[in-house]
Amino acid sequence: MKFYIQHILMQEQRKYQRTRSMKKDYMIVRDCVSKEILSLCENYFRMKFFVTKDYDQLLDTITCNNNDVVKPFSIFQYADTFAEALLIHLLPVISKTTKISNLQPTYSFVRFYENGQHLVKHTDRPSCQYSITLPLASGCNTDWPIFVGDEQIDLNLGDLLVYKGCDVPHWREKYEGTWQVQAHLHYVDGDDPAYSKYILDNRPDFGVKK
Ligand SMILES: [Fe+2]
């Protein structure tokens, strides 16, 4: 699997000359995920959280996590298989957006947000040099902006936000909708000694829990 990723990156490096890394604290890629893939996501996440027992199983593991950044608490899963596939699939576009030719994946997780939750203002751990928020499915059309630094950013399903998670504080006010699923994908610059040691979040391969 690691070899496969290196092959993808080599192809992208031929397309994009390395210039300067992302100057702004964040970038938005609108409609990054196609309508077809969004439809697939809705089916997958509705099954994951409403039909199978994933919700109940995760609930048991999450409720005691008082250090989580979402309050009062929310369901999330580290290295969900579909999210890990997105982590790989979107690597070329994130590499292009950040202008980092040796961008390396670290880890993914998916989070199931529900009415009344908010995201505490925070910065991320070192594996999240470049953090992605990507809304993929929702039970309503209620907007739920994210704040990055001093900016308010509105995202529709399929819009991707990449930001410097370790440097820039980010948060969300109280969610007024019913439910929403977001993928959170994370990458580091493989040529940056301060971050390269976090490649794959120190896991042996994709799809593996930490
Ligand atoms: Fe964060």
Image (tube, rainbow, N blue to C red):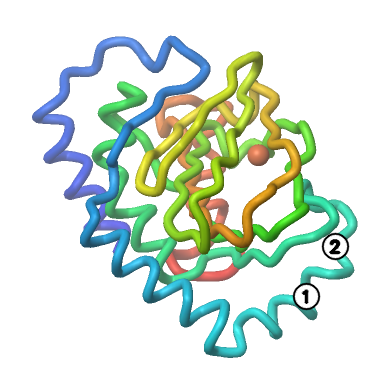
Asked if residue 90 can be seen in this view, the reply is yes
Q: Tell me residue 93's x, y (percent).
A: 26, 37
The residue indicated by pointer 2 is: 65
Q: Is residue 57 left or right of residue 127?
A: right
Q: Quadrant of residue 30?
A: top left
Q: Which residue: 38% across, 53% down?
A: 87
Front-most of residues 76 and 92: 76
Vertical order, 14 against 73 (above or below): above
Vertical order, 206 against 156 (above or below): below
- For label 1, the crowd category at 10 Å Cα-Cα, with few meaning under 14, some 14 to 19 and many 20 or more, is few
Q: Report if the beta carbon of the residue with label 1 is closer than 8 angstroms to ligand 1.
A: no
Q: Tell me residue 191's x, y (percent).
A: 41, 27
Front-most of residues 163 and 33: 33
The amino acid marked with disc number 2 is: Asn
Q: Which residue: 68% across, 48% down?
A: 176
Q: In the orientation shown, which residue stands out farthest toward the bottom? A: 52
Quarter of the rendering occupied by the N terminus: bottom left
Q: Is residue 169 left or right of residue 185?
A: right
Q: Quadrant of residue 62?
A: bottom right
Asked if residue 108 can be seen in this view, the reply is no
Vertical order, 152 against 141 (above or below): above
Front-most of residues 96 and 39: 39
Alpha-carbon span between mark 1 and mark 2:
8 Å
Find residue 61 and name its label: 1
Give the quarter the ligand 1 occupies: top right
Q: Which residue: 45% across, 32% down?
A: 162
Say whether marks 1 and 2 touch (CB < 8 Å): yes
Q: Tell me residue 107's x, y (percent).
A: 51, 53
The amino acid marked with disc number 1 is: Thr
Quarter of the rendering occupied by the C terminus: bottom right
Q: Which residue: 47% across, 49% down?
A: 135
